[in-house]
Structure formats: structure tokens, C-alpha cells
Image: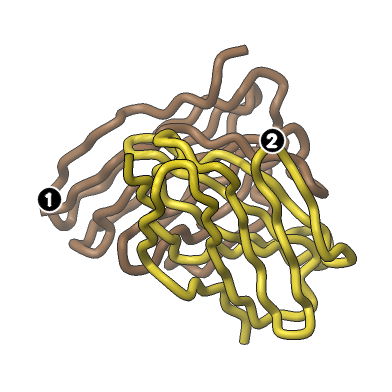
Amino acid sequence: KAGVTQTPRYLIKTRGQQVTLSCSPISGHRSVSWYQQTPGQGLQFLFEYFSETQRNKGNFPGRFSGRQFSNSRSEMNVSTLELGDSALYLCASSTRGRGQETQYFGPGTRLLVL
Amino acid sequence: GESVGLHLPTLSVQEGDNSIINCAYSNSASDYFIWYKQESGKGPQFIIDIRSNMDKRQGQRVTVLLNKTVKHLSLQIAATQPGDSAVYFCAEVLRGFGNEKLTFGTGTRLTIIP
């Protein structure tokens, strides 16, 4: 089975721009979660999607949004980028996103905002 | 409030020795805890988890101990190998109404000295 894939792997943007990141979960996984990872804050939960619906949301501003398609692929969008948005964005998939299911992480998209 | 924190940001261990990575948490209502390993350039990889009603759980070369009295979690890695060099995160999972909240610690960098 192929693992979780994320595209692009690296991205450079300037302040004020917007960005869209993509995540393809493991085949058969319907839950996709997004995380932001920075040296100072560690891994922080952004949101989770299941069956095209946002089921869970972290404490991030509305500039951060996401969606999930019928094939479970997910995208996240960050509008009006700020310098502090520079981070590694990780997505993780699991079968149902419930209980002690193992979440499988992708390699991440490293975003640099200049 | 709730938080998950780590006692030490870095840890160096001689190859072949055992290592212990510690984690403190503050939310006594957490349902279970997970340890992840993140190697450079990769996403976090599940290592082992433990339910809140357990004190100890063992895996291959790894043991997780949970002390609910002092809200402390530890990951013991036996007979460390160079491939164990990575950043290790603990995470706590709190189940709410129809959703789960996953909170990560900031991570400990483990370096295995050959």
C-alpha cells in the first residue's frame, strides 16, 4: 500500500499570498488530519476531515481552511500568508479517525513565507 | 488548562545503552497517550500507545510507562541503535462529544552516539 503523500514538498511564498497544499491518504482511509509543525510550538492540530466533512478543528484563525474530496484526498488553504505561517505542514490519515487507530503521517510540505 | 510538555529537549545516549524520554501532562481526563518518532525529513511515525487505565505497555525494544499520580509518561528504548536517533513526541488524546483532540508535546531529540 502506498503511504500518505503530500504535494508540494517545498514551497516559498511571500506575505499576503495564499497557498494550497494537497494530501492523498492511504487507500481506504477516510479520515485526514492536518497539523502545523514549528520549532517553537511543536505539532499543532489544524483540522480533521472525514467523508468530506470537517469533523474536528483546532485553534487556528479562519485564514486556515481545508476541504476533502469524495476520494478522501484533502487540501488545505492558507490565505493572506504571514511570516509566522512558515512551518512544516503535515497530514495524517487513518481508517475512521476514531479510537486508538494509528495515524499515518505524510512527509509534510515545508512552507517558507518571506 | 491542558498541556503536554517534555522535561528535556535533547538527549544523547551511547549506542547499546537504554534511553528514557520523559513527558509531563496536565489533563487527567486524557483517554490515551501516544509516542511518535520523527526522523529528519519525514513525518511522525507511530511507536506505541497506552490507554489511561494502564500503567505499562511493552513493544519491540520499547516500553511506555504511565504514572497517573504525577501525570508523567515515559518512553524507554532498550539497546539503542543508530536508527533510533530522531525526535520523539508524546501526545495525549482527549475524547469529547463526537470528536477527539490530539495534543502533542514539543519533542525530545534523541542522539545515539556510536
Q: Residue at x 81, y 65 (%)?
A: B31
Q: Place residue A62 in its image quadrant.
A: bottom left
Q: Nearer the viewer, residue B76 or B109?
A: B76
Depth-wise, is mark 1 or mark 2 nearer the camera?
2
Which quarter of the rendering shows the N terminus of chain A? top right
Viewed as shown, does residue B67 lie left or right of B53?
Answer: left
Q: Nearer the viewer, residue B80 or A24?
A: B80
Q: Residue at x 42, y 56 (%)?
A: A64
Residue A75, image x, y percentages? 47, 36
Amino acid of disc 1: Thr
First-in-chain label (1 vs 2)? 1
x then y, percent, for residue A90: 44, 43
Q: Residue at x 21, y 37 (%)?
A: A11
What residue appears at the point 58 percent right and 49 percent down from the top-left corner? Answer: B77
Check residue B53 in the rendering and tell me which mark sits there, or answer none: none
Drawn colour of chain B?
A: yellow
Which chain can be seen in brown? A
Q: Are marks 1 and 2 on the same chain?
A: yes
How many tags in the picture? 2
- Give the residue at mark 2: A94
Q: Chain of mark 1?
A: A
Q: Which element carries disc 1, helix, strand or loop?
A: loop
Instruction: Kindly give the residue lying farthest to the top in the view shown.
Output: A1
Q: Secondary structure at mark 2?
A: strand
**Foreground pick, A107 / B88:** B88
**Circle 2: is it few (<14), some (14-19), or many (20+) Cα within 10 Å?**
many
Q: Amino acid at mark 2?
A: Ser
Q: Which label was assigned to residue A14?
A: 1
Q: Are marks 1 and 2 in contact (CB under 8 Å)?
A: no
Give the distance between the C-alpha atoms of the residues marked 1 and 2, in whole angstroms. Answer: 33 Å
User: What colour scheme has been applied to the protein in the rendered image?
Assistant: by chain
